[in-house]
Amino acid sequence: MFDFINFTFIDVIDVFVVAVLLYQIYRVVRGTGAIAIFAGIFVIYLTWIIVRVLGLELLSSLLGQIIGIGALALIIVFQQEIRRYLLMLGRRSSKGIWRKIFIVRNFEVDTVVKEEVYEACVAMSNTKTGALIVIERTTDIEVYMSSGDRINAIVSRRLIENIFFKNSPLHDGAMIISGGRIAAARCILPTSDNPNIPPELGLRHRAAVGLSENSDALVIVVSEETGRIAITANQAIAAKNHK
């Protein structure tokens, strides 16, 4: 009855692959209402496995039917998350391959971008203008760019300030810089559900940490309440007062 305990090397690979897939699914649904549904489906499937091992045929058959129908329900419920993940996976893979083949860096442009972003952040900090700026690195964040309005403009201090001006239609959301240019604005970022984030930090900071949890992008936040500038990278957030 417990023959399944005798693991082979293939079984270890099988378990590892399943664990990776489950983790990727968790990353997609994390921070959304779908996480509770996913947890419920996982519990039902785990129960079905245990029932089969114990040889409870009737209950196993009943749960098997529920899981069979639930597979279709799973696709319907998670259609947005599945679409988002497949889009992100495909674009990340293709873009990553070309980046490894053609590595092009223009340090003069990078320096200009940093200076323009810095000056804009200092100016917005002085006026307590809220801002959320993302600088793409190696991880493809095209899926988040597509959630906003395309701009494809040269990075300049005045344009950044105009985007985040309170009466601007583009001020609500994140601005993403990709390839040395402002690629999009009013973009929606994933919010982090990390309980260690201080409660006094708002949604901009949670969105900044949320993106750093899913990519290696550099995210800059200007607080609308205090004017302080914070930078997130690799799931860490650091506040900086330029004064």
Image (cartoon, rainbow, N blue to C red):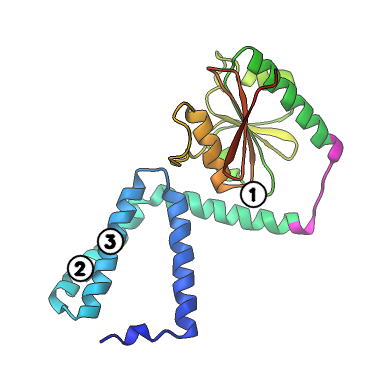
Q: What separation in Å lies between label 2 and label 3 (alpha carbons)?
A: 11 Å
Instruction: Write down the residue under mark 1.
Output: 139
Q: Is residue 43 visible?
A: yes
The C terminus, quarter of image: top right
- Image location (x, y in percent) of residue 70: 27, 60
Q: What separation in Å lies between label 1 and label 2 (alpha carbons)?
A: 40 Å
Q: Is residue 156 visible?
A: no
Q: Residue at x 51, y 35 (%)?
A: 207
Q: Residue at x 57, y 30 (%)?
A: 174
Q: Nearer the viewer, mark 1 or mark 3?
A: 3
- Amino acid type at circle 2 is Leu
Q: Earlier in the sequence, mark 1 or mark 3?
A: 3
Q: In the image, 126: left or right of 15?
A: right
- Amino acid type at circle 3 is Val
How many residues crowd around disc 2 within 10 Å: few (fewer than 14), some, or many (20 or more)? some
Q: Nearer the viewer, mark 2 or mark 3?
A: 3
Q: Earlier in the sequence, mark 1 or mark 2?
A: 2
- Image location (x, y in percent) of residue 209: 54, 39
Instruction: Write down the residue under mark 2.
Output: 63
Tell me: residue 8, above or below residue 111.
below
Mark 3, secondary structure of its residue? helix
- Amino acid type at circle 1 is Thr
Mark 1, secondary structure of its residue? loop
Instruction: Write down the residue under mark 3.
Output: 43
Tell me: residue 214, above or below residue 123.
below
Q: Earlier in the sequence, mark 2 or mark 3?
A: 3
Is residue 105 located in the magenta-colored stretch of the structure?
A: yes
225 or 89, which lies in front? 225
74 or 111, which lies in front? 111
Q: Which residues are magenta?
A: 100-108
Q: Quadrant of residue 126?
A: top right
Is residue 217 located in the magenta-colored stretch of the structure?
A: no
